[in-house]
Amino acid sequence: MIVLLCILFFMPLFTYLPMTAVAAIVIVAAARLIHFDFAFQWRIRAYREIVLTVLSFLSTFFLGPELGIVVALGVSLFLVVKHTTMPNLAILGRTPSNKWRDISLFASADSIPGVLVVRIDESLYFGNIEQIKDMISRIERLGDPHLHPSAASRNIVPVHGVVIDCKNVNTLDSIAITELLGMAADYKRRDITFCLIHVRLEHLTSLEAAGLFSHVPPQNFHSRISAAVEQVQSIHAAKQRGPLARSSVGFRQSIRTTIIDDYEGPTSTRHFETPDDDL
């Protein structure tokens, strides 16, 4: 109210006020709007947020408020796109204590020859599914998602089984479901066993409606990574001995029964529970 009265009736009194005094008033008023604890951000190593804040301040100071806002929005949008195009994917290995850990973080975790076990730490949607699909393909062929396609493979033996842990996949859109169908069909054509772990019940409903179960039989859905790996190894051993008979009769009821038996938790987070050996 005071500001409005000053603007309407007292502006002529400020005609001869020095610009430096006006600038000081603006700085004092704007300083109270800034709530950024640099010490705390530095202590938790939030260097990206610190750089973005300093860059926004300097661009606003030297280029003006309009260009400063444009620069801040542009850098923020760039970071979002970068995160989308570089999704987080972990290759899991088994430790001596039978725990499954990221092999890039735990030296004691050893990958299983011929079996690729990965954990997707992102929601799957149109913005990242192509990148995730390409990363899994590179790991399968080369053993590392960052190797160039022309590089030599690091895999000791050819991959005959792919196990994907979906524990951290919170959302799944139609584009991601379509790409998963394509992956499953390709693995089936190449005779590679494809297993999914910790899939949420609501996601399975969508996958069933899309026809995933025609490519991935019910026994390939598990609540434990160890169980999936053992199944992949058993199927591979059986293939070495001879044809493996597979029956699809009643597979939809079977998969739903498996899900219900393993389900515990609120409706909003229905998924296979994570046993101790997968933590």
Image (spheres, helix red, strand yellow):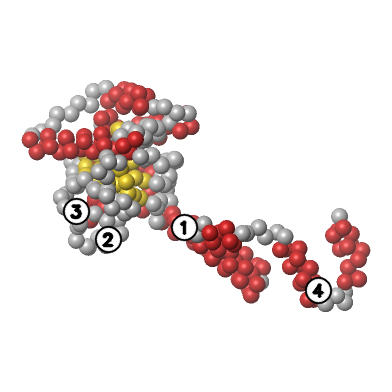
Earlier-in-chain disc, 1 versus 4: 4
Give coordinates of residue 12: x percent, y percent. Answer: 91, 71
Q: Secondary structure at mark 4?
A: helix
Cα–Cα span, label 3 and label 4? 69 Å
Residue hosting label 4: 21
Residue hosting label 3: 155
Amino acid type, label 4:
Ala
Q: Quadrant of residue 277?
A: top left
Q: Secondary structure at mark 3?
A: loop
Q: Is residue 162 above or below residue 23?
A: above
Cβ atoms at labels 1 and 4 below 8 Å apart: no
Q: Secondary structure at mark 2?
A: loop
Residue hosting label 2: 147
Q: Quadrant of residue 233?
A: top left
Earlier-in-chain disc, 3 versus 1: 1
Earlier-in-chain disc, 2 versus 4: 4
Residue hosting label 1: 81
Q: Residue at x 35, y 40 (%)?
A: 279
Cα–Cα span, label 3 and label 2? 12 Å
Cβ atoms at labels 3 and 4 below 8 Å apart: no
Q: Secondary structure at mark 1?
A: helix
Amino acid type, label 3:
Asn
